[in-house]
Amino acid sequence: MEIDNSNQIRDNKIILFANQKGGVGKTTICGLFSNYLSDTRNVSLLVIDADPQQTFASRRKDDSRRQKDIPYKVQSVTIKDPSSTRNIMLTLRGLAGTTIIDTPGSLTQEGMKELLANADYIVCPYHYDLNTIDSTRAFILAVLRLKQAYPQIKAQFIFVCNKYDVRVGKGSELQAWKIVDEFFKKYGILAPRIGNYADLERYNTISNSDKADKLTKQCFDFIFKTIYKVNDND
């Protein structure tokens, strides 16, 4: 397969996927959205795996053994040193194209401030369970405190409810979830929900299946149009 780069979107964007709560599907959504940008939207793309677990980078290594044509580059970095992280981010800011960064799960990582200071958007997946909501709220407030201390941090939140199951939730729970969404709207943009489907867990780092594309289309189209200021009828 020969990749046509003639009409690639090469706007310089830096997008973080972040939440301090594990299990919300941060890396999965990061991978699915990266494939969407590269394949569906023809965006010039680099993915940085800055999570110590290196899940995304490891999966790409496995995928590259089976797939010859690689649509975008995946690079592992460590952000333990703020100075080197700052230099990395300055380099990324000078590149043509979009950089997606799968971040560590904690804001205590020394280089997280440098990631935030140079990012355009923070995509923050969450679930409607009490522990996740509390942890996500704490994460939002921690980022806001950093913004107050470091005014150069301009990144905007995009919140994504992931693994949403329409079969779950009584009247009182639905009302509580509505309150949660309204709280998140105070601090960022609320994207359409992504459902709870096994097909989305079986992602790779090359391209999405037709089923995965269909299940994520509404959400990813919304995020794409928000970030790239596109208004189309796709």
Image: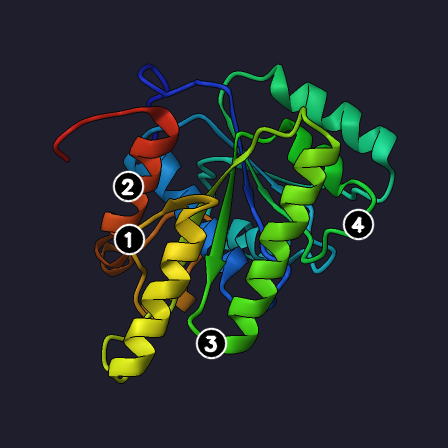
What residue do we see at 64% from left, 60% from top?
20
Amino acid under disc 4: Gln
Q: Position of residue 160 (x, y in %)?
A: 40, 54
Measured Cα–Cα span from mark 1 to mark 3:
18 Å
Q: Earlier in the sequence, mark 1 or mark 3?
A: 3
Q: Are marks 4 and 2 in contact (CB under 8 Å)?
A: no
In the drawing, does residue 139 fall left or right of residue 218? right
**Between tags 3 and 4, which lies in front?**
3
Measured as percent of width and height from the top left, residue 115 is found at 68, 36
Residue under numbered circle 1: 192
4 or 2: tag closer to the N-terminus: 4
Residue annotated with mark 2: 222
Which one is nearer the viewer's eye here, 62 or 47?
47
Element type where label 1 sits in the image: loop
Kind of residue indicated by mark 3? Asp
Task: Say above or below: 176 vs 231.
Answer: below
Q: Is residue 111 visible?
A: yes
**Percent x, y of residue 48:** 62, 40
Label 4 Cα crowd, 10 Å radius (few <14 / some 14-19 / many 20+) = some
Identify residue type, mark 1: Pro
> What label sits on residue 109 in the rendered view?
4
Tag 3–tag 2 contact (CB < 8 Å): no
Q: How far across and down, in percent of the image, does residue 120 sit?
A: 53, 29
Q: Is residue 170 left or right of residue 159?
A: left
Task: Report the front residue among 175 and 126.
Answer: 175
Instruction: Please identify the quarter of the rendering in which residue 47 is found.
Output: top right
What's the colour scheme? rainbow
